[in-house]
């Protein structure tokens, strides 16, 4: 999944990810080593183009200030996005629905919720204002991908969604399948998705990581920090 996320980054873009984002953090390192050496990387601790010796186990770790060209605090990142200057943001959601809206708030009756989620942090600011947003979720099942979220924490400019089974793109206001990962059947995607994902049978196979991408992935994350999300 880190490679699939890395492919969404374009050279020269200003890229940001939030908390609990080991996969996007790794993806930045992969893209920087391959097709996007000119990206500008912003993170939660405030590092601008940080180059830590090793990826930390937390995306709020002080290591993400190592080698930074400058420090850019979170309020400034929100302002940057509001001004339309943040090219790409990676955001997650406990639920991602058919419209690309995300839920990070709660499940059930708001007065007595069944599940309290961690909250949206800055997602309600970033999702509608970043030029592009790529969502990801390491679980792909009907509860995680419902027709409509139990509560909409944030809504906005979703470009792609990366899951363990497939890639979605947003088209006509809804998520539709773009490709299925190797070995994943159309039936598996349909059964795991709580909304109509579109023409699964016609969706091509997601290209598997190339040797160069695999090598860049290992170089970016030799300690396997990305696996903390699974």
Image (tube, grey):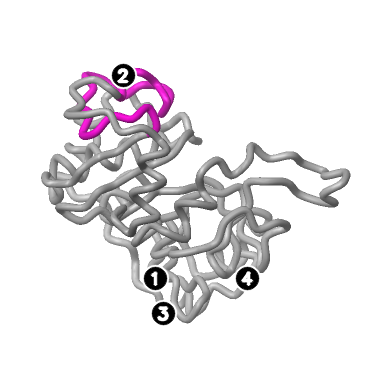
Q: Which residue is mark 4?
A: 195
Quick one: SS at disc 3? Answer: helix
The span from disc 1 to disc 4 (Cα, nearest Å) is 15 Å
The span from disc 3 to disc 2 (Cα, nearest Å) is 44 Å
Q: Which residue is mark 3?
A: 202
Pick out the residue farthest to the right: 112
Quick one: SS at disc 4? Answer: loop
Decide whether the magenta segment is chiefly helix, strand or loop.
loop
Estimate how packed mark 4 is, as few (under 14), some (14 to 19) or many (20 or more) residues with alpha carbons within 10 Å.
some
Q: Which residue is mark 2?
A: 63
Q: Position of residue 46 (x, y in %)?
A: 33, 30
First in sequence, mark 1 or 2: give its number: 2
The span from disc 1 to disc 2 (Cα, nearest Å) is 36 Å
The span from disc 3 to disc 4 (Cα, nearest Å) is 17 Å
Residue 57 part of the magenta segment: yes
Q: Nearer the viewer, mark 3 or mark 2?
A: 2
Residue 138 part of the magenta segment: no
Q: State which region is magenta.
A: 44-64
Residue 182 visible, this orientation: no
Query: Which residue appears at 56% of the width and 49% of the height?
Result: 93
Q: Position of residue 77 (x, y in %)?
A: 36, 42
Q: Position of residue 100 (x, y in %)?
A: 53, 64
First in sequence, mark 3 or 4: give its number: 4
First in sequence, mark 1 or 4: give its number: 1
Estimate how packed mark 2 is, as few (under 14), some (14 to 19) or many (20 or more) residues with alpha carbons within 10 Å.
many
Q: Which residue is mark 1?
A: 178
Q: Say which of 191 and 137 sits in front.
A: 137
């Amino acid at each position: 999944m880190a490679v699939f996320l890395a492919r969404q980054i374009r050279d020269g873009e200003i890229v940001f990810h939030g908390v609990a984002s080991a996969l996007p953090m790794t993806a930045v390192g992969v893209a920087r080593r391959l097709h996007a050496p000119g990206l500008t990387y912003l993170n939660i601790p405030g590092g601008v183009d940080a180059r830590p010796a090793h990826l930390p186990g937390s995306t709020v770790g002080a290591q993400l200030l190592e080698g930074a060209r400058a420090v850019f605090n979170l309020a400034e990142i929100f302002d940057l996005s509001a001004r339309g200057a943040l090219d790409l943001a990676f955001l997650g959601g406990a639920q991602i629905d058919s419209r690309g809206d995300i839920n990070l708030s709660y499940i059930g009756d708001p007065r007595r919720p069944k599940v309290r989620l961690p909250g949206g942090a800055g997602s309600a600011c970033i999702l509608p204002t970043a030029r592009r947003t790529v969502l990801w979720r390491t679980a792909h099942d009907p509860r995680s991908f419902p027709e409509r979220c139990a509560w909409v924490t944030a809504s906005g400019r979703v470009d792609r969604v990366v899951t363990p089974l497939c890639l979605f793109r947003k088209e006509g206001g809804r998520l539709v399948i773009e490709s299925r990962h190797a070995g994943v059947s159309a039936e598996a995607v349909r059964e795991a998705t709580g909304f109509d994902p579109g023409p699964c049978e016609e969706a091509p196979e997601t290209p598997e990581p190339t040797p160069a991408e695999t090598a860049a992935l290992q170089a970016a994350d030799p300690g396997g920090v990305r696996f903390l999300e699974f």
